[in-house]
Amino acid sequence: MTVDDPVARLRAAGCVLAEEEARLIADAAGDDAGVHESLLRRRLAGEPLEVVLGWAQFAGLRIPAAAGVFVPRRRTELVARLAAALSPPGGTVVDLCSGTGAIAAAVAHARPDLEVTAAEIDPAAVALASRTLAPFGASCMVSDMDGALGHLAGRVDAVTACPPYVPTAQIPLMPREARDHEPRLALDGGPDGTALQREVLAASSRLLRAGGVVILETSEALAPLTLAAAAHAGFAAGIERDEDLGAVVVVARRA
């Protein structure tokens, strides 16, 4: 390799999957050497690869990604998969803290019979998610949790959410592409990581019909606290895992 080799440059910058990243950047740039160098420098500066490319791979879909909006992680595919499996025919699903709309898009794609609504407090994320969801017949609205979803109270079969759950003190320990290039609002879960999870559970109590479920991403370390929060909110809860994805999800059912 020469010092100008994109793989060598990416590897020197700490990119573990340097070969794959170099290939994706080259594909995105096509034959334009100037664009290629620009994209490469953005990645070397620490921008998330998905933002550099303009899309993230999620549940077999290409989800548009943009600067300033949380990048969906592959582990979150378990949330979407469980929602598609647990929702009744013709049911209603609400995705809270939706970010790019990845969960909502994956659920709507897998289950066209469902009514899928995404909600997100950040208008920039809502604009991005709305464009993503339109081809799937789903929608996204600006809402602080269920604040704008009163019309769905007591009618929802499944609530999905990947709220921020990194304890505040641990944010400086995150990879720089997250801590420096993703909005703090999408990372900070409060002192113990459960602040937004508790808000999702409270909103779910208002949204869900009897027997409905909330499917909530968490971490292995945080899972006991998430389970306790679900029990405190009146849900019967258990844990689902996907070892291949490194995913941990709490599924909590309303009585």
Image (tube, grey):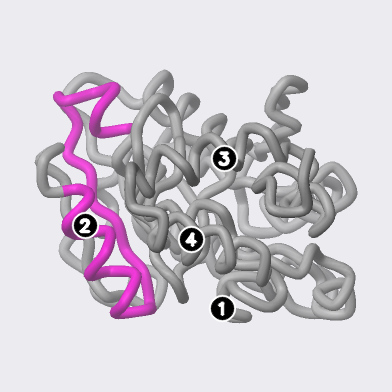
Give the Cα separation between the discs numbered 1 and 2: 29 Å
Please identify, in this view, whether the residue under mark 1 or under mark 2 is nearer the observer.
Answer: 1
The crowd level at tag 4 (other Cα within 10 Å; few <14, some 14-19, many 20+) is many
Mark 3 or mark 2, earlier in chain: 3
Which residue bears the numbered disc 2?
152
Left or right of 185? Residue 51 is: left
Residue beneath the point at 71% across and 40% down: 18
Q: Which mark is residue 183?
A: 1
Residue beneath disc 3: 76
For marks 4 and 1, give the one nearer the viewer: 4
- Residue shown at the point (11%, 41%) measured from the top left: 135
Q: Amino acid at mark 2?
A: Leu
Q: Which residues are magenta?
A: 107-133
Q: Can the viewer see residue 163 in this picture?
A: yes
Inspect the image, locate mark 4, and give the three-letter code of the amino acid beneath it.
Answer: Leu
Residue 128 place in picture, x, y as percent: 27, 64
